[in-house]
Amino acid sequence: MSVTVELLEALLSPAAEQRQPAEEYLKAMTGADRCGAFLQALSTIQQPHLKQMIAVLLRRDILQIQQISILPDMVDPLLAAFGSTDSSRRTSVGDCLAEVCAVLSVLAPTECAPVLQKILQAIGTSVRLRLLLRYMHTVHNTE
Amino acid sequence: MLLSIIGYCVVCFTHFSFFFISTYASISISISIQASQADLPSLHLLVSLADRAPRAFCDSSALQSLPQLLTAALSSSSSSTTTSTGAVVVQVLTHLVVTAAIATTLQDDNAAVLASLAGTRSREDKDGSQWNSRSSVDVDSAAAQLGRMCLPTLVPSWLQMMTASVALVGGRGVETLHATMEHLIQAANHAPSLLAGDAAVLQAVAETCLQIASQLSSSSSHNANDCNDDHQLCCLSAVQVVSSICAVGDVKRKIIHASLRNAILQGNQSTIKGAIPLCLELVVAGTDSDYEGWAYDPATLNDDGVGWEGDEIALYAESLLESLLHSFGSHALAVVLPLVEQLLASSSNGDFRLPRAGLVALQCCLVATPVSFAPHMSVALEAALSLSVNSSNARVQFQAIFLLGVLCESGAHKDEIREQYGARLLQTLAQAAQSSCTKIAAMACFSMVSYCRGDPSDKTEMDGERFVVPYLSNVLRALVVGPLSLELAHSGAVVVKMRAVGAVACLAQASGPEFVAYYADIMPGLLACAQLSSGGSYDVSRLKGAAIEAATIVGQAIGEDHRDVFVGDAEQIMRWAVPVLSHSSAADAAGMPLDQLLSACARIASVMCEDYAPFLDAVLPHLLRRATDEADVSITVSAVLCVARSLLVLKT
């Protein structure tokens, strides 16, 4: 089961006959499957408004997830999305990362520390890369 | 050839830059976000991590890296602080520091809980402050260290933000500054050690916030109206930072020294105003200037006229003034009173907001510092009495009448106030009860109740014979001629009548048997109100309930010696009440709260004694049902006892 552009557009539709089947499709998935599908879609779907919607729905699922064990595995794809999307969507993806840490800190504190450290290092790395890219771009423009 | 040399230079330069950046990055700690523009999503993520996973955040490298992060981000973006993006960076950095401080405070509290559970630490620390971070400041805490290391870097940026926001047309810059102040208020409430753990930091924060508030206050007076509210709100939020941190127990008792206190209250430079002058300025400026619209709006059950929708800024300033008075007591009073004198002296210059602000300030002084204010009660009374009569502005009159009520409720010098001012008080209130402005009339009746009852927490009875009976005739005449004669169709009349009926009941209760001389003038009107047709109107049904309640209070007040005077009217009330009690639908149709009706029945029972027997069958089931209810309903013991007493008399 996967999350596609058509499914997400149907969720946003004002017409109930389009929206309800899409909602039923998502509800039929387990929480873990839905998280996996959202992560996959986050990396493949390019439309910014759909990426933001995925992040919002994913965050809700992270809060309600019952299989805590999958949370650490979600960090890497989320970090990849955090580093690659545009600024306004990155905040939504960042909220998902924070939610992962929040749930782990309460339900599995020993797993939270390494996850948090990974996030912190990735923030620094992604910013350094951005700086470099920005500098390279500036240098290129001055040639 | 030339192109190849240039290309070679570019490549070398690029590699050098890459090496430089990598080296810098490797020297920096893991979250060093140095940038000409700090990465906002990353900063937001750090804030979210600190907020949602405080324990893990405190244990990570992030907390230790914060000071360097701040320095790097701000030093590299110092020239852009005046832009909207730069301002947002400063705001998010402030949020990050505050959230981190709160996280460390929670950690400290949790550690204390665990230690006490393990028996390694007593539940109260040596200074008894471990369990309430809102009243204590720990100079050795992680939050205090964070404050020492981070705030000296941030404070200048707030001033730059303020300069930029004042220069910008429109709200965006002020919004960001306002959000920054909100974060600091949160710090003052939940992690005061961040702001007050170091005396120098506290002074810098307080002076900067007051400087921000001063300049915003000045700019709001020059702005167009659509920017005014934003600037004023931001100004007050800056003042609230100071008032919140000063409200912390340890801060006001141990940390703030005299010169800082004076600087906070009065200001110390021509450009930095004190918190009290700022609050008073905004009580004036934040009051809705449309006094005619206020007066035209009728009194309602839910709105007694004190909180008016156009006065939000003034009400906010008033609450901060009260907080400052509460924190600093007589020191603040010494600053407020001269300013009040100036405001009251300007009552003739045409701006009603000035004397009104003076009256509001007097009320705040009385509520916040009742003991220190006691020597000034007579001055406040004279001012209120004078303005309630002499001012031509309805809002000033209302505020004066309201202040008179608050003064009457004051426990200090209760008898002296009534001894010296009783006649003038009641005369003024009686006159105001006949005002064409329904809000003033309703408030005058409220204040009469305050005069009769005094301090609600004071259980001693007032000497009605000295302080009420001599003036009863004039007061009752004014009530009968004024509010009690209003046509119900008149806008706001129902509410005014209800308040007037309540005032009559209190006057009767205070007068006791002396009220019998006025019984014949008052009781027919009360009974007529009790039998009004409510026609589905909630307000009218409340009026009916109030009238029945007042009638029974009057009957009980005149005492057993005059029982015969009330018995006939009591039977009439019971003949109306029994069908209402017997049929629940009738009770619903009457719209009168059942508890109010039962209390009235209990009072009647206390007067009628054995003559109450015919009505017991209708009343007792309701009383017993209420008595066995588990809901949050209370029934007075006296009500049951009154009925039980009647039963005993009947048996004998």
Image (cartoon, coloured by chain):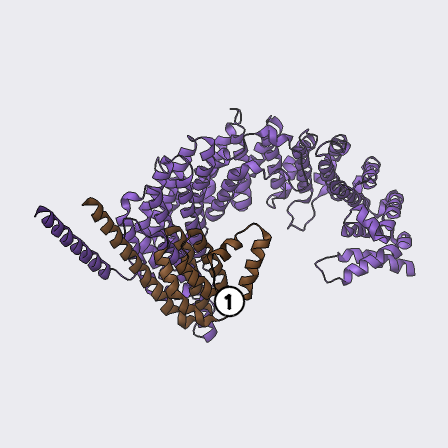
Chain colours: A brown, B purple
Farthest left residue? B1
Q: Residue at x 12, y 52 (%)?
A: B8
Farthest top residue? B349
Task: Label 1: state its secondary structure.
Answer: helix
Using the image, determine if residue B487 lies above or below residue B7.
above
Can residue B18 be seen here? The reply is yes
What's the chain of the residue with tag 1? Answer: A
- Judging depth in this view, the residue of B342 and B422 nearest the camera is B342
Can residue B600 be seen here? The reply is no
Residue type marked 1: Gly
Q: Is residue B289 left or right of residue B640?
A: left
Q: Residue at x 54, y 58 (%)?
A: A22
Q: How many marks?
A: 1
Using the image, determine if residue A77 lies above or below residue B394.
below
Q: Position of residue B549 (x, y in %)?
A: 78, 45
Q: Position of residue B195 (x, y in %)?
A: 38, 53
Q: Residue at x 55, y 42 (%)?
A: B366
Q: Position of residue A127 (x, y in %)?
A: 30, 56
Locate residue B356: give its quadrant: top right
Locate residue B402: give its quadrant: top right
- Disc 1 target residue: A31
Q: Position of residue B587 (x, y in %)?
A: 81, 49
Q: Quadrant of the C terminus of chain A?
A: top left
- Judging depth in this view, the residue of B478 and A26 nearest the camera is A26
Q: Could you classify mark 1 by the number of other residues whose Cα lies within 10 Å: few (under 14), some (14-19), or many (20 or more)?
A: some
